Image (cartoon, grey):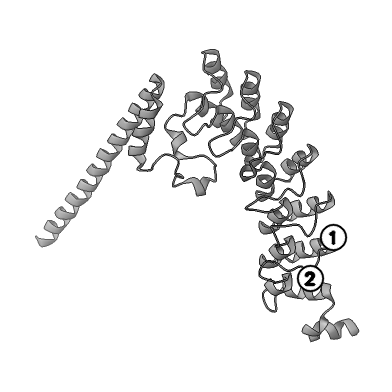
Amino acid sequence: MEDSTILYAFNNIYFAIFALFCFKLLIKISLALLTHFYIVKGNRKEAARIAEEIYGIAPGKIHPFKNYFKQPYFIGSWADRSPLHEAAFQGRLLSLKTLIAQGFNVNIVTIDRVSALHEACLGGHVACAKVLLEHGARVNAATIDGITPLFNACCSGSAACVNMLLEYGARPQLENHFTSPIHESVKRGHRECMEILLANNVDIDQEHPQHGTPLYVACVHQRTDCVKKLLELGANVDLGKRLDTPLHAAARKSSVEIINLLTDYGANLKCRNSEYKCALDLAAPNSSVEQALLLREGKFQRFPSIFFLAND
């Protein structure tokens, strides 16, 4: 009897939880529909306010899933995304053409000034981006954070998008270094995008205030292919982030292959950073990185076994 009472109580609890979940879901669906209604009517501020209530996040703050998906736009953009934005991001070319034919403005932007072209490039949808550009989309439009369609194309790794944007007059190097397309390309290991930008006269040694030079970024993120190509194209092997050199970054990341590449191109082993440390000082004791740096310096005495083998 007692067992059945306990089971009945648990069933009631589970039912109450399920009912509460359904109720909250119904509220969110209703608010989402109301938001869509305000977007259609053109009242974006009210749509943004309702979206803020749905998610409990103030406009401009990063969406909780942003780090997972690694997509550079914000919750403030969600509330007033038009059907044109959705079609561009999802790569639905026919829908996009239909919406434009119906009179949608290709330069319509969200509160954060995200355009449909931004969305198409972020998704790597070349055909959609081309249609938007052919209908007058602004190729150098920037969001409130200075992000351009070219930056998004580099983020997605779409070399075709990068080429097309440049053909339509996209600026490959901006005064706003915080959204540098070449640094984004290197960071994500999109070598082809990086090469296209460099072929369009982007400064190979452009030093980003926060991230340093493209070579330094490649070393920090261990993009070996990018490191090799940058060195082949003449990047300054000792220019990094302020006093920190690419060799310092490679030593921190314990990347022997990159250390060998840098030293092959003449990296200065004696360079010291703001903490007055050279690359060897940053290498983990008795690690392969330390051995590689010692070998380059010719200090075999730190590793007797290596020294004797060399003399044998």
> Residue 270 bears which disc, if any?
2
Q: Quadrant of the C terminus?
A: bottom right
Q: Is residue 41 visible?
A: yes
Residue 200 higher or lower than 8, as above or below: above
Q: Residue 44 location, x and y as percent? A: 40, 27
User: In terms of image quadrants, where is residue 310?
Assistant: bottom right
The kind of residue tagged 2 is Lys
Residue at horizontal 48 percent and vertical 40 percent from the top: 74
Please state which of residues 94 and 285 is positioned toward the viewer in this rendering. 285
Name the element at disc 2: loop
User: Circle 1 is placed at which residue position?
Assistant: 265
In the rendered structure, are the residues bearing label 1 and label 2 in contact, judged by CB atoms less than 8 Å apart? no
Please state which of residues 261 and 249 is positioned toward the viewer in this rendering. 249
Name the element at disc 1: loop
Residue at horizontal 85 percent and vertical 60 percent from the top: 265
Left or right of 4 in this view: 100:
right
Q: Residue 24 location, x and y as percent? A: 27, 40
Outermost right residue: 312
Outermost top residue: 102
Residue at horizontal 55 percent and vertical 13 percent from the top: 101
Left or right of 215 in this view: 145:
left
Outermost left residue: 1
Left or right of 130 in this view: 9:
left
Please state which of residues 263 and 291 is positioned toward the viewer in this rendering. 263
Label 1, label 2: how far apart the Cα atoms are = 15 Å
